[in-house]
Amino acid sequence: MDGSCKILYENDLHKCVMFSFDDETHEDSFLSVNQYLVVDNGVGILLDPGSDVAFDELYDAVSEHIKISNIKYIFLSHQDPDVSGSIARWSISANAKFILSSLWARFMSHYGFMQTDRMILLNDKGATLKFGKSSLHFIPAHFLHSPGNFSLYDETSKILFSGDIGAAIVGAPNQYKIVDDFLKHKEYLQGFHERYMGSNKACKTWVNIVEKLDIDMIAPQHGFLFDGKNTALFLAWLKELKCGSDILGTL
């Protein structure tokens, strides 16, 4: 498995790092995943750390940017194994609290994690967490695609970590590419979003929230990053997308 990292934002106290792992030898059966780390004044939050398969290499890569003991939080945007599958190993290796939807607390035992006292459970409306001199916002993204799903917005970097929203299914390797032509990139978005996103109503609800934010970059869990004009183009496209229950009769 091949993985590397890229710093997406950095100032004197605050840093956002992207990790990505691809398996070129098993491209047909392996789904590449982006993981993210936000550090402020030496304290970290790890976002969507992924499956057990990625744990060892991600642990080593994260250790180059922060002491594992200084990871205070681990955020799980939803319940899928490519997001949460390594929760048991991270619970042993780090002293972090785990932030996730209250819908998925009981399901974590199926990944071998039983310590409910280490969970910070989000209600459906989301939450704001003081982090350093600014805040992290857990934004409801329900049915996109999980019924208990959240995006995370970092006030300092102005990065929206969007989970599966904006995900593109592209072949390995794809580390750290930024969308340069949204019209061409749509072909990698279309099928995934039509099938995995719940409905146009769910898309519009999320876009109506996030388009009010000051966003410099959208960083999804799979595929490429959006910045500049392509951020607005993606949000406009998603707002009008027919998907999920909208196309049920055509499947």
Image (tube, rainbow, N blue to C red):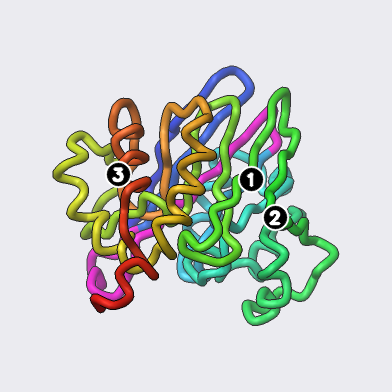
Q: Earlier in the sequence, mark 2 or mark 3?
A: 2
Residue 116, how many percent across, how many down? Answer: 81, 68
Please give the residue where the numbered disc 1 appears in the rendered image. 138
Residue 85, how many percent across, how many down? Answer: 55, 71
- Residue at the top extreme, as displayed: 12
Numbered circle sitting on residue 99: 2
CA gap, disc 1 and disc 3:
23 Å
Question: What residue sits 62% from the left and 35% below the top?
Answer: 39
CA gap, disc 2 and disc 3:
30 Å
Numbered circle sitting on residue 237: 3
Q: Amino acid at mark 2?
A: Ile
Residue 172 shows in this picture: no
Q: Is residue 210 left or right of residue 120?
A: left
SS class of the residue under badge 1?
strand
Residue 229, by quadrant, is top left
Pick the quarter of the image with the N terminus: bottom left
Q: Is residue 251 magenta?
A: no
Q: Earlier in the sequence, mark 1 or mark 2?
A: 2
SS class of the residue under badge 2?
strand
Residue 45 shows in this picture: yes
> Looking at the image, which is closer to me, 177 or 202?
202
Residue 153, by quadrant, is top right
Q: Which residues are magenta?
A: 22-43
